[in-house]
Image: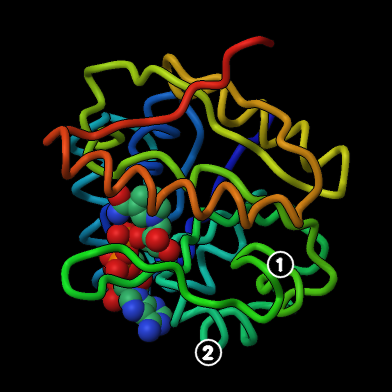
Amino acid sequence: VVQSIGIVGGTGPEGKGLAARFARAGVEVIIGSRSAERGEAAAAEVAGLTGGKVRGGTNLDAAAGEVVIITLPYDGLKDTLGPLAATIGGKIVVSAVVPMRFEGGRPQMVDVADGSAAEEIRALLPQARVVGAFQNLSAHKLMDVDHGLEGDVIVCADDREALQATIDLAGLIEGIRGVNGGPLSSSRYVEAITALLVNINRVHRTETHVQIVGI
Ligand SMILES: NC(=O)c1ccc[n+]([C@@H]2O[C@H](COP(=O)([O-])OP(=O)(O)OC[C@H]3O[C@@H](n4cnc5c(N)ncnc54)[C@H](OP(=O)(O)O)[C@@H]3O)[C@@H](O)[C@H]2O)c1
């Protein structure tokens, strides 16, 4: 059972949303930021919403969590993760990052040399056991902590133990099932689903998730 989760880049909507769900599940959460004050303010907000154990600080403070989740914008990965590598070491690092930008109001995937944001994180943190997960969960729905979510989180990793630990973490979110999505290199497909969901959300004026049927 995971005791604490650090969230690097945790002051944005996605980081706070995941923090809220894990805090509700009884896990201690550390929200990281480039500014300790912003980290503390986000933690106070999530603690108020959930009644959970939430601390805030710098991204280095978040890197001290037992498991580290990355909710940075894709463009911030290189500068932010290098200085955290020594603290993170061989821990489980979960990427929720989607390398997507908006062009003319439409989502566009950014070409990533490593194949996916998750694989780029592995290149930046070569000792870490990197996992791709949570890329398709909308921040808005995550923050609505009094309602369960319905759907699946596809989890991709090369390290079996890290994969299973992250499937278990996903299962802590009410209504969510973690599904083994295969190797870390498959994260590129999961990341791209988010661009599709953004388009579907626009057409249907709602927030959608994915569910895998047949297993
Ligand atoms: N929003 C969603 O619904 C959603 C859903 C699925 C996946 N995602 C993915 O999750 C990640 C976070 O999404 P978000 O909407 O929460 O993003 P965000 O608000 O734009 O960024 C998250 C945090 O990262 C920090 N940050 C911003 N630019 C940075 C930079 N250049 N270098 C270092 N840190 C920087 C900021 O915190 P400080 O200023 O406090 O450091 C910011 O609060 C993205 O990769 C996104 O694709 C988002």
Where is residue 89? Give x, y as percent. 79, 69
In what quadrant of the picture does the C terminus appear? Answer: top right
Q: Quadrant of the N terminus?
A: top right
Q: Residue at x 38, y 32 (%)?
A: 21
| Res 90 → quadrant | bottom right
Specify which label sits upstream in the sequence, 1 or 2.
2
Foreground of the two, 8 or 107: 107
Q: How is the image coloured?
A: rainbow
In this rendered view, identify the residue nearer to me: 86 or 140. 140
User: Label 1, on which residue?
Assistant: 119
Label 1 crowd (10 A; few <14 / some 14-19 / many >=20) = many
Identity of the residue drawn at 57% across and 21% down: 212
Residue 113: x and y, percent?
Answer: 67, 81
Nearer the camera: disc 1 or disc 2:
1
The quarter of the rendering in which ligand 1 is drawn is: bottom left
Residue 22 visible in the shown view: yes
Q: Secondary structure at mark 1?
A: helix
Query: In the drawing, does residue 26 fall left or right of residue 189?
Result: left
Under 8 Å from ligand 1: the CB of mark 2?
A: yes
Examine the rendered structure and indicate whether residue 111 appears above or below residue 32: below
* Amino acid type indicated by mark 1: Glu
Q: Spatial distance from mark 1 to mark 2, Cα to Cα?
A: 16 Å
Residue type pointed to by label 2: Asp
Between 110 and 91, the residue placed more toward the observer is 110
Residue 87: % across, % down: 70, 73
Mark drawn on residue 209: none
Q: Is residue 211 above or below residue 63?
A: above
Q: Which residue is mark 2?
A: 79
In terms of secondary structure, where does tag 2 sit?
A: helix
**What residue appears at the point 27 percent right and 29 percent down from the top-left corner?**
51
The location of residue 31, given as percent across then percent down, is: 40, 57
Q: Is residue 132 left or right of residue 200?
A: right
